[in-house]
Image (cartoon, rainbow, N blue to C red):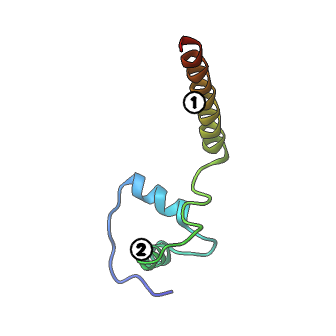
Amino acid sequence: MGTADEQIRVSTRVKRQLEQRQREDESYNDVLERVLEEDTESDFYDGFGILSDEDAARIREQQKESKKGRKERMRQLDKDI
């Protein structure tokens, strides 16, 4: 972990994304170094833990509703044939 030589300004959105990627006891600089290093590597776990439980539940529910809608449309098409 290095010391900060410079300061940079980031938007609230970028700061929030850094905080979501931040591991315990990591500084923002540590997060940026890790993310920039990972940029060239593919990691299976990329993206895990980014969503809150509420967001994940909402997305699962939307997927479930979309699937029901697709099945219903397929049934309707089958009846029309």
Q: Is residue 32 above or below residue 71?
A: below
Residue type at tag 1? Ser
User: Residue 54: x percent and y percent?
Assistant: 65, 41
**Residue at the location (61% across, 19% down)?**
75
- Direction bottom: furthest residue: 2
Q: Residues within 10 Å of mark 2 (few under 14, many from 20)?
A: few
Q: Within the image, what quadrant is residue 80 found in?
A: top right
| Residue most extreme to the top | 80
Query: Please, what secondary structure does the residue beneath circle 1 have?
Result: helix
Which residue bears the numbered disc 1? Answer: 66
**Which residue is pictured at 66% across the width and 40% down the height?**
57
Label 1 and label 2: CA atoms lie apart by 33 Å
Residue at horizontal 61%, vertical 26%? 71
Residue 47 place in picture, x, y as percent = 55, 60
Residue 11: x and y, percent?
36, 55
Label 2: which residue?
39
